[in-house]
């Protein structure tokens, strides 16, 4: 997300690092490039104008301390203003109800039903509590079936009463949730246009009948600046508490994210980052500003690791590495843990300085990962614990069992041997890292 915008902004900012000081002349050239980068990313013109004026004013008015590089100072100013533009402080969900009720609204085709399933999964993982999905989209063919299918996939219950009145369904679902001790109720409403008076009145009736703590509008980021009109239209009818911005992982310029808060005063609370059921992230303006400027997002990386990796397994593997006992069983277990974190390309982008190190263009072929896993799984437990016993006939059997070649088996064993030697070197203190 924001790759093109990030590249343009970083290139513009890089130029000022060669200057000894910030002046009216060099800042004007810089601001022109930043203005063009934002406009090409489909950021609203008024927002761009205000943003560049603020950055220029602060950069020229800032007294540069001799120990601070002008380029570093300028980066800080741009990051601070980007953070402010994206909403300043992140806003948590209001989950104080018993149960907490979240109502999802939006246009048809915005990804609302998928987003509500992802959000229920996110809340269950984050807070270890029990969500209930409610099927109130009684108009779109197969909408109820889609939600039930997603609920089955996630092992999350879906409450539905077929094609009955959505207001009554919502009220009955909340009563059911209270009786059965659910912590969250997530109501999936029918997609509609904000100019459709009848359907908008229905949303208002649902709101007044169940009094949700959160009313979240799902917006497709590929809509561009039309999204502002949609948010404003819905917000005029309903008191929106936040926006879920979908498809930020797709081929989108992303500028709408930089315009929403400033123009509508409605905060972005979540962003869709992949099609998978765990492909939703809490939106943090400061972290997002850092990502756009190529500073990475180490906090999100740590959070992903904390959520996905089994701490005891990780400690066990680390201890065996230190003792020089790390074998292919440990390797397989570690590989499975890493796979839980999601596509490696996405994780690499969160590493600070990844772009400078040329890592952002790294492509990890999932098929190659699958081949490695198949090779290790085709070994006997004894072979995984003692890979040194794997000779010619065993390699042929392993290659045949994994659908790979003997050359691939050899390559894996060689790489594993090199990795073990490196681990021993680190453990013995013979390998020093330059940091």
Image (cartoon, grey):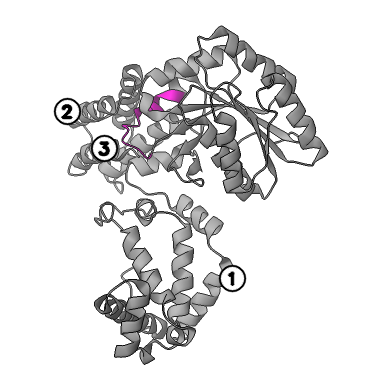
Dot 2 falls on a residue whose secondary structure is helix
Dot 3 falls on a residue whose secondary structure is helix
Q: Nearer the viewer, residue 374 or 38?
A: 374
Q: Nearer the viewer, residue 303 or 202?
A: 202
Q: Quadrant of the C terminus?
A: bottom left
Q: First in sequence, mark 2 or 3: give its number.
A: 3
In the image, 72: left or right of 287?
left
Q: Which residue is mark 3?
A: 4
In the image, 164: left or right of 9?
right
**Which stretch appears magenta?**
249-260
Q: Quadrant of residue 242?
A: top right
Q: Quadrant of residue 187?
A: top right
Residue 177 position in % (x across, y down)? 76, 36
Q: Which residue is mark 2?
A: 25
Q: CA distance from mark 2 to mark 3?
A: 26 Å
Residue 312 is tagged as: 1
Q: First in sequence, mark 1 or 2: give its number.
A: 2
| 417 shown above or below 309 | below
Residue at horizontal 75 percent and vertical 25 percent from the top: 171
| 374 shown above or below 220 | below
């Amino acid at each position: 997300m924001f790759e093109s915008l990030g590249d343009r902004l970083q290139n513009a900012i890089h130029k000022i690092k060669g200057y000894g000081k910030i002046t009216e002349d060099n800042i004007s050239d810089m601001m022109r490039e930043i203005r063009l980068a934002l406009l090409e990313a489909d950021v609203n013109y008024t927002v761009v104008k205000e943003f560049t004026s603020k950055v220029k004013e602060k950069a020229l008015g800032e007294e540069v301390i001799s120990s601070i590089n002008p380029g570093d100072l300028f980066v800080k100013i741009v990051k601070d203003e980007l953070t402010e533009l994206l909403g300043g402080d992140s806003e948590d969900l209001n989950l104080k109800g018993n149960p907490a009720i979240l109502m999802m609204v939006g246009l048809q085709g915005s990804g609302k039903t998928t987003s509500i399933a992802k959000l229920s999964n996110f809340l269950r993982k984050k807070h270890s509590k029990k969500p209930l999905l409610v099927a109130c989209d009684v108009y779109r063919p197969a909408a109820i079936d889609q939600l039930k299918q997603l609920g089955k996939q996630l092992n999350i219950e879906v409450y539905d009463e077929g094609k009955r009145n959505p207001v009554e369904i919502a009220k009955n679902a909340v009563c059911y949730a209270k009786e059965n001790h659910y912590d969250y109720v997530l109501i999936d409403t029918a997609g509609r246009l904000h100019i459709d008076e009848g359907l908008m009145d229905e949303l208002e009736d649902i709101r007044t009948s169940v009094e949700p703590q959160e009313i979240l509008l799902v917006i497709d980021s590929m809509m561009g600046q039309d999204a502002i009109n949609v948010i404003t239209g819905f917000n005029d009818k309903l008191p929106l508490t936040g926006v879920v911005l979908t498809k930020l992982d797709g081929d989108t310029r992303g500028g709408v994210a930089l315009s929403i808060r400033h123009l509508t005063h409605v905060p972005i609370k979540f962003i869709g980052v992949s099609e998978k059921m765990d492909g939703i992230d809490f939106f943090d303006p400061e972290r997002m500003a850092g990502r756009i400027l190529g500073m990475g997002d180490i906090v999100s990386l740590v959070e992903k690791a904390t959520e996905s990796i089994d701490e005891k397994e990780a400690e066990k593997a680390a201890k065996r590495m230190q003792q020089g006992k790390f074998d292919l069983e440990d390797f397989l277990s570690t590989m499975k843990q890493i796979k839980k974190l999601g596509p490696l390309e996405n994780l690499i982008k969160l590493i600070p300085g990844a772009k400078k190190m040329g890592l952002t263009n790294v492509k990890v072929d999932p098929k190659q990962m699958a081949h490695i896993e198949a090779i290790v799984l085709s070994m006997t437990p004894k072979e995984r614990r003692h890979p040194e016993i794997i000779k010619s006939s065993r390699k042929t059997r392993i290659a045949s069992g994994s659908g790979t070649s003997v050359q691939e088996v050899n390559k894996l064993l060689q790489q594993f041997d090199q990795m073990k030697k490196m681990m021993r070197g680190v453990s013995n203190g013979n390998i020093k890292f330059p940091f």
